[in-house]
Image (tube, rainbow, N blue to C red):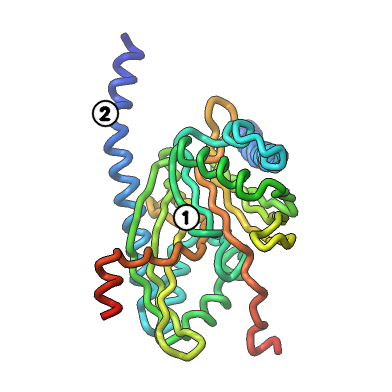
Amino acid sequence: MKYAIVALALLAFAPAARADAKAEARKVADAFVAAVNVKDPQKSVPAVLALLTEDIQHIGIFGRVHGKKELTPILNKAFVDPNRHVTLTQQDAVQLDPNTIQSTSHFDNVVSGPDGKPMSLPLRCTRTLVKQKDGRWLIAAEHTSFGPPPPPPPPAMKDQAKR
Amino acid sequence: MKTSFAMMAFALLTAGAAQAGDSRTEVTAQLRAWEAAANSHDVARVMALYADDAQYIYGFQGQEGAGRASLEAFWKQSFQMTPDIAVTLKSVEVVPVNANVAVGMALWEDTFTGPDGKKVTAQVQTSEVFVKEKGAWKIRVDHASFVPPPQPPPPAAK
């Protein structure tokens, strides 16, 4: 009987925990987008770093990065790009345990192309968020890679495009 | 009394360090098991290393999905399309998150015959999020992408 009550309580808690995980991960993803989109790199780089643990472990389009110390000069260089703009296109998350959320984000990342004109790159990002003692969720590990190219337009649109 | 607090603190610290050490060893062993399973081209052996609700993101052709059926179909197709694929785990770093979650960050070398008949060697970087299920580490999220070309040195270093 005691076990049944505990099991019921856990079942009742589970959907709420899932909803919280999604909401918390969404907050981090939104904060990341807002930080990247601040035009002044002197403000945007610290704003991004504030979302990461000190020893953030990163794999991404810049390769393997260990900790904020290695990441800071990379961000300083990347954020000089005047065309830089990020849009969150998809976001999901699961709670791995009470202190860990696994987040998946899709971004449309605009950067300057080789000709200096804005160029859009779809990015996919998996992040392990860890709850801190003060209640904040910080990114402890992340992997970013180029996403698939957008699907080809449906036949009707292709025909219109030809005309 | 002070001594017993110090002893308790020491015991907790060493227990934490031992736990992190264990997860590093165990997750590295799981990645070695993945390497052996992938090289055997035995889909069931590969799938045994994943959690039922595993999610994958592969940067090669933009593949992405979740769940055992989707992942199994991916590996079946991969082994059919590249029947001579061989993977080598070049290095691994394990990030112990807590007793039940750890992230393995690894570098691999994949070799296979390309569509043009030429041998291809690709450097692949992966992050595998492991969760402990019934005492065994299982891959919950598998993200793989090609290693980017080396970045030019920053201006100050030139």
Q: Is residue B54 above or below residue A155?
A: above
Residue B2 visible from this viewpoint: no
Callout 1: SS: strand
Residue B72 visible from this viewpoint: yes
Which corner quadrant holds the N terminus of chain B? top right
On residue A12, the disc is 2
Distance between the Cα atoms at labels 2 and 1? 28 Å
Q: Left of A113 or right of it: where is A73? A: right
User: What residue is drawn where x is 32% and y is 26%?
Assistant: A10
User: What residue is drawn where x is 46% and y is 41%?
Assistant: B70
Total marks shown come to 2
Q: Is residue A132 above or below residue B60?
A: above
Quick one: A38 or B139, which is closer to the camera? B139
User: What residue is drawn where x is 30% and y is 45%?
Assistant: A20
Residue A60, horizontal then vertical, whole percent:
55, 65
Asked if marks 2 and 1 touch (Cβ < 8 Å), the reply is no
Residue type, numbered disc 2: Ala
Q: Nearer the viewer, mark 2 or mark 1?
A: 1
On residue A42, the disc is none
Residue type, numbered disc 1: Thr
Quarter of the view holding residue A70:
bottom right
Q: Which residue is mark 1?
A: A126
Quick one: B123 or B72, which is closer to the camera? B72
* Other residues around mark 1 within 10 Å, as few (<14) / some (14–19) / many (≥20): many
Q: Is residue A103 above or below residue B75?
A: below
Question: Mark 1, chain letter?
Answer: A
Callout 2: SS: helix
For marks 2 and 1 on the same chain, the one whose residue lies earlier in the sequence: 2
Question: Mark 2, chain letter?
Answer: A
* Other residues around mark 2 within 10 Å, as few (<14) / some (14–19) / many (≥20): few
